Image (cartoon, rainbow, N blue to C red):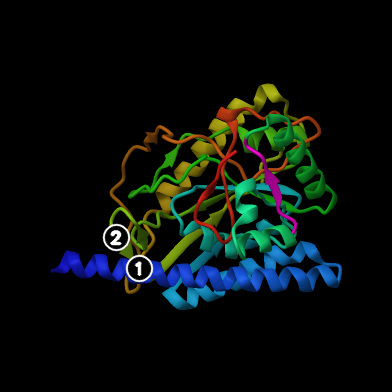
Amino acid sequence: MASLFKNLKFTTKAIIAIIVTLISAIYGVLCSVFFTIIGKKHLAQWSTARFYYHFFGKTFGIKIKIDRPEILEKLPAILISNHQSELDVYLLGRLFPQSCVVTAKKQLKYVPFLGWFMSLSGTFFIDRSSRENTRRTLDNALQELKSKKGGLYMFAEGTRSYATKPTLLDFKKGAFHLAVQAGIPIIPICISNTSSLYSPKLKNFNTGTINVKVLDPIETSNLTIEDVSKLTQDTRNKMEKVIMELGMSPLDGETSTFPEPSTPSVIPASDGASITGHSSPSVVVEEENIGESTSLLSGSPNKV
């Protein structure tokens, strides 16, 4: 009976979450039209992200606590974080900088409301069937990022882990290639494990707090392509250490749910790479080296 009630609770909340997402997408369409008219199109995605963050957070009682949020404004930069589940869309709503370039798979362009919002707000759509088109789109996206001194948010693991303990998948190199080729910093963002709050596997959908720690920007201006592998691994090691320290996201009424100390482990990536990317003057688009991006209003990874 307890298991049945838990499944029913999860399903009910998941349906409500879909409704919240749909309403946010409609808001995004209207918001995009308004900001385009007044010449501030670049604010449409940020405004919609904040709307979704407040709407979702109030509806489900999930809070976000950020250590050193001011670093998120040190742009231009590529922002990377661990990628756990669909709940990361909610986190993006809080972490998303005002001027941020986003890419998504071409198919999302034709989704009612969501696709309309993304098209109107300046999303760069990736055609996965054409490597040349992908490269060209990424070049255009990164040029806009640099010209507007904005940010690019990427999930370096390349897929959602659905991890039930604080850990990381292997990192894809896409974000690091882009940062080095563009000569812009990487800002690592470490997020406590959220499976205690939301997990399709465990059927959890609870109230609580997500703890986030923003690390110092990592400069790449003096690095070359030969440094990318070491940069990728060093950044992953640094982030995993902090994620282990953050532990589990505490439920309401708990002060912490930190796990027993253990040796950090690597989970092999089980999925193909995908991207929320931007590109540099001659971006390297290698299938095994691309990160993942998730649309602000879609729980689905955007595969490239």
Q: Is 123 a magenta residue? A: yes
Residue 288 seen in the current view: yes
- Closer to the camera, 146 or 69? 146
The image quadrant where one finds the N terminus is bottom left
Residue 9 shown left or right of residue 298 in the figure: left
Residue 301 shown left or right of residue 137 in the figure: left
Label 1 Cα crowd, 10 Å radius (few <14 / some 14-19 / many 20+):
few
- Residue 61 locus on image (x, y percent): 42, 75
Please give the range of residues in magenta. 121-128
Residue bearing the label numbered 2 = 203
Q: Main secondary structure of the magenta part?
A: loop
- Closer to the camera, 155 or 29? 29
Q: Amino acid at mark 1?
A: Thr
Q: Residue furthest top?
A: 226
Q: Is 34 a magenta residue? A: no
Residue drawn where x is 66% and y is 25% of the image = 227
